[in-house]
Protein backbone atom coordinates (compact mmCIF):
# COMPACT_ATOMS: atom_id res chain seq x y z
CA UNK A 1 0.00 0.00 0.00
CA UNK A 2 2.76 2.43 0.87
CA UNK A 3 4.37 1.99 -2.56
CA UNK A 4 1.09 2.67 -4.34
CA UNK A 5 0.45 5.76 -2.20
CA UNK A 6 3.96 7.01 -2.96
CA UNK A 7 3.36 6.59 -6.71
CA UNK A 8 0.06 8.43 -6.42
CA UNK A 9 1.69 11.29 -4.51
CA UNK A 10 4.49 11.47 -7.08
CA UNK A 11 1.89 11.64 -9.86
CA UNK A 12 -0.01 14.43 -8.10
CA UNK A 13 3.19 16.41 -7.52
CA UNK A 14 4.07 15.93 -11.20
CA UNK A 15 0.68 17.27 -12.29
CA UNK A 16 0.99 20.30 -10.01
CA UNK A 17 4.57 20.92 -11.21
CA UNK A 18 3.41 20.88 -14.84
CA UNK A 19 0.54 23.25 -14.03
CA UNK A 20 2.83 25.69 -12.23
CA UNK A 21 5.35 25.61 -15.08
CA UNK A 22 2.59 26.24 -17.64
CA UNK A 23 1.15 29.18 -15.69
CA UNK A 24 4.57 30.67 -14.94
CA UNK A 25 5.43 30.57 -18.64
CA UNK A 26 2.45 32.88 -19.27
CA UNK A 27 3.32 35.52 -16.67
CA UNK A 28 4.16 38.03 -19.40
CA UNK A 29 0.68 37.68 -20.89
CA UNK A 30 -0.94 38.32 -17.50
CA UNK A 31 1.36 41.29 -16.84
CA UNK A 32 0.72 42.92 -20.21
CA UNK A 33 -3.04 42.38 -19.89
CA UNK A 34 -3.05 43.98 -16.44
CA UNK A 35 -0.96 46.89 -17.69
CA UNK A 36 -3.33 47.45 -20.61
CA UNK A 37 -6.34 47.53 -18.29
CA UNK A 38 -4.66 50.15 -16.09
CA UNK A 39 -3.85 52.29 -19.14
CA UNK A 40 -7.42 51.92 -20.46
CA UNK A 41 -8.83 52.95 -17.08
CA UNK A 42 -6.68 56.08 -17.04
CA UNK A 43 -7.68 56.99 -20.59
CA UNK A 44 -11.37 56.57 -19.74
CA UNK A 45 -11.01 58.87 -16.75
CA UNK A 46 -8.97 61.53 -18.59
CA UNK A 47 -10.96 61.67 -21.87
CA UNK A 48 -14.47 60.36 -21.18
CA UNK A 49 -15.93 61.95 -24.36
CA UNK A 50 -13.50 60.06 -26.62
CA UNK A 51 -13.95 56.78 -24.78
CA UNK A 52 -16.41 55.26 -27.29
CA UNK A 53 -14.06 55.69 -30.26
CA UNK A 54 -11.15 54.45 -28.19
CA UNK A 55 -13.12 51.39 -27.08
CA UNK A 56 -13.95 50.55 -30.69
CA UNK A 57 -10.30 50.76 -31.77
CA UNK A 58 -9.15 48.89 -28.70
CA UNK A 59 -11.61 46.04 -29.14
CA UNK A 60 -10.63 45.77 -32.79
CA UNK A 61 -6.92 45.69 -31.99
CA UNK A 62 -7.32 43.25 -29.12
CA UNK A 63 -9.48 40.99 -31.28
CA UNK A 64 -6.74 40.85 -33.90
CA UNK A 65 -4.04 40.14 -31.31
CA UNK A 66 -6.06 37.49 -29.48
CA UNK A 67 -7.08 35.91 -32.78
CA UNK A 68 -3.43 35.63 -33.84
CA UNK A 69 -2.56 34.14 -30.44
CA UNK A 70 -5.34 31.55 -30.77
CA UNK A 71 -4.22 30.63 -34.29
CA UNK A 72 -0.65 30.18 -33.00
CA UNK A 73 -1.85 27.92 -30.20
CA UNK A 74 -3.97 25.92 -32.65
CA UNK A 75 -0.87 25.29 -34.75
CA UNK A 76 1.02 24.14 -31.64
CA UNK A 77 -1.79 21.75 -30.74
CA UNK A 78 -1.83 20.34 -34.28
CA UNK A 79 1.94 19.85 -34.18
CA UNK A 80 1.69 18.09 -30.82
CA UNK A 81 -1.03 15.83 -32.19
CA UNK A 82 1.05 15.00 -35.26
CA UNK A 83 4.12 14.19 -33.13
CA UNK A 84 1.98 12.06 -30.82
CA UNK A 85 0.60 10.09 -33.75
CA UNK A 86 4.12 9.48 -35.07
CA UNK A 87 5.29 8.34 -31.64
CA UNK A 88 2.25 6.08 -31.20
CA UNK A 89 2.76 4.50 -34.64
CA UNK A 90 6.44 3.91 -33.89
CA UNK A 91 5.61 2.22 -30.57
CA UNK A 92 3.00 0.03 -32.26
CA UNK A 93 5.40 -1.02 -35.00
CA UNK A 94 8.24 -1.75 -32.56
CA UNK A 95 6.29 -3.68 -29.95
CA UNK A 96 3.08 -5.01 -31.46
CA UNK A 97 3.92 -6.03 -35.02
Image (cartoon, rainbow, N blue to C red):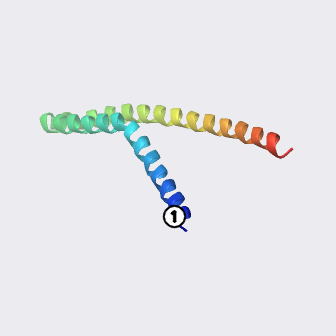
| Up/down of 54 relative to 88, above or below | above
Position of residue 21 in the picture relative to residue 87 (left or right): left
Q: x%, y% of residue 84?
A: 67, 40
Position of residue 91 in the picture relative to residue 49 (left or right): right
Q: x%, y% of residue 24?
A: 37, 40
Position of residue 28 in the picture relative to residue 46 (left or right): right
Outermost residue, front side: 2
The residue at the point 48 percent across, 50 percent down is: 14
The count of marks equals 1
Outermost residue, left side: 46
The residue at the point 18 percent across, 34 percent down is: 43
Report which quarter residue 83 is drawn in. Answer: top right
Report which quarter residue 95 is drawn in. Answer: top right
Tell me the quarter of the image containing the N terminus: bottom right
The residue at the point 15 percent across, 34 percent down is: 47
Position of residue 56 in the picture relative to residue 75 (left or right): left
Q: x%, y% of residue 34?
A: 27, 39
Q: x%, y% of residue 25?
A: 40, 36
Outermost residue, right side: 97
| Mark 1 residue element | helix
Residue 74 vs residue 54, the one in the foreground:
74
Q: Which residue is mark 1?
A: 5
Report which quarter residue 32 is drawn in. Answer: top left
Residue 82 vs residue 42, the one in the foreground:
82
The residue at the point 37 percent across, 34 percent down is: 62
Tell me the quarter of the image containing the C terminus: top right
Residue 29 vs residue 50, the one in the foreground:
29
| Residue density around tag 1, few if under 14, some if 14–19, many if 20 or more, within 10 Å | few
Amino acid sequence: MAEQEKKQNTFIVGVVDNYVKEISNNWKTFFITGLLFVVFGLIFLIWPEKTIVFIAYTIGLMSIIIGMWIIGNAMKVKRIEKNYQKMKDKIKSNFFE
